[in-house]
Image: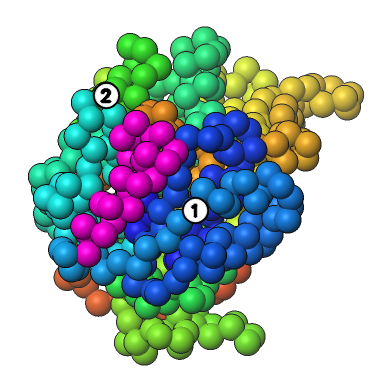
Amino acid sequence: MFFGGTGDLAYRKLYPSLFNLYKKGNLRTHFAVLGTSRQTMTDDKFRAAIKKSLADSGNRADSKEASDFISHFYYQAHDVTDTAHYSVLKDAAEKLDKKYKLQGNRIFYLSMAPQFFGTIAQDLKTQGLMSTNKDAFNRLVIEKPFGRDYDSAKQLNDALSKSFEEEQIFRIDHYLGKEMIQNIEALRFGNTLVESLWNNRYIDNIQVTLSEKLGVEERASYYDNSGALRDMVQNHIMQIVSLLAMEQPVAFTDTDIRAEKVKALRSLRVYNVADAATNFVRGQYGAIDNQPDYRHEDNVPHDSTTETFVAGKLLFDNYRWSGTPFYVRTGKMLADKFTRVDVVFKKPLVDIFAFPQSQSTPLAANVLTIFVEPHAGFSLQLNAKTADAGFQTEPIKLDYMVDAAKSAETPEPYERLLHDVLKGDGTNFSSWPEVSYAWKFVDQIRRVWDLQEPQFPNYTPHSMGPAAAEELIQRDHREWIYRLNK
């Protein structure tokens, strides 16, 4: 059951992802989709919209397979704030249950404003829409944002917990559905060579960069009430960092993986006021050519202090990572659109090639790069001898990039995550403890920033952010691995 079933997310991502699962046999006969929204619409009109959704995503929407898939879709106009309306949904759900022999299994996907989550969850239970069959499942799927600070997130979670158990709640973060984010666990725990070096004795620092080339565009109203810290750091970046920092789980199960991610986030140092001000910087893009500055984008107040860029240093107070910083940065209107992780290893304690008469350049650090998007793959930078006379060293790269054929076969993030929901696998979803620790960390940064008036705008579009982001890492005698001049 999709609440917000006529929304943009449902049409662009959810319905095409379901169709991909259908084509692969993960959904075939025993399923039905009931879409709801305030709009008045017939089943036929809803199905026509689904057909267009499939066509727009590059599918053969006029095929028999597509027609069979679309025949499983139904629509019911619904006001989520009107308790009486839920009886109509209940009747529709029960009819579909009998028609498609669903055995009482129900998934409720809330693709709408989060202020309605608690109300819907409560009415789903009190009005009897949740299955009472002891052998059936009830699962609730919610989109971010999960609150705008710890207090609001806890209030939301408390409301959901009155109707659903934690293991029934699936908080979607689409970054956790990306191929190379899921590959972090395979890279670490499937390779002795990597995991044996994955600690503060051998790693100097880890860098996570989520760069966006575009500005806020049609999301300006939402974005100005959120900003890069809440929109990207609290969820996407903190989830990636927890996968990089976690200990090896006892087994590859959702319970064990989540437990280790929570332990890692518990050890993340929550900064005091002085350290928060020192270790995190923010920015807002200015104007260039025909591109207006952020404050002159449509639906943005001219005096907005909302940040469109964040860079920061994270420290873990545990045995594995003590003394090894994690640097993160994200922003809009940057040089290009990409996501990458750079793992920078420590240099040899003694550079034996730098003897007094040598003209050799200093050894470069070994760097393992995980390319997440737009191209997926790995790169390992090593030092090797040049082919010239004498003895000189130079950095070389061992690369593996997913080819176009494999990339075309790779499931989209929402396809993976919807499949996980159907299986009841919570591995790639945020648990409440993860969300809560992330908010506690981010809230402290936000409190410090709210005490200061920023000097915006402070970076040029198509750069990699403000000068303060460079100063942040250079202060530690380090540099960003991805730089525009490299």
Query: Given the image, on which type of amino acid does mark 2 rest?
Result: Asp
Residue 205 against residue 9 in the figure, above or below: above
In the image, 407 versus 482, the foreground residue is: 407
* Secondary structure type for disc 1: strand
Please give the residue where the numbered disc 1 appears in the rendered image: 73
Q: Position of residue 277 (x, y in %)?
A: 24, 58
Q: Secondary structure at mark 2?
A: loop
Please give the name of the residue rendered at 69% of the width and 25% of the height, measured from the top-left corner. 383
Count how many numbered circles sit on residues in the image.
2
Foreground of the two, 352 or 52: 52
Q: Are marks 2 and 1 in contact (CB under 8 Å)?
A: no
How packed mark 2 is, by other alpha carbons closer than 10 Å (few <14, some 14-19, many 20 or more), is: few
Residue name at image x 70 percent, y 55 percent = 61
What residue would you read off at disc 2? 135
Q: Amino acid at mark 1?
A: Phe
User: In the rendered structure, which segment of residues is drawn in magenta?
Assistant: 85-111
Please tell me in which quadrant of the rendered image residue 87 appears: bottom left
Between 321 and 236, the one lying in front of the other is 236
Instruction: Kindly identify the residue that appears in the image at 55 percent across and 61 percent down.
Output: 47
The percent position of residue 194, horizontal first and vertical second, equals 52, 17
- Residue 52 vertical placement versus 40 (above, below): above
* The label number, if any, that marks residue 54 in the structure image: none
- In the picture, measured across the screen, residue 401 lies left or right of residue 190, that is right
Q: Residue 104: within the magenta?
A: yes
Which residue is at the front of the view, 223 or 277? 223
Asked if 354 appears above or below 420 in the picture, the reply is: above
State the separation of the CA atoms marked 2 and 1: 25 Å
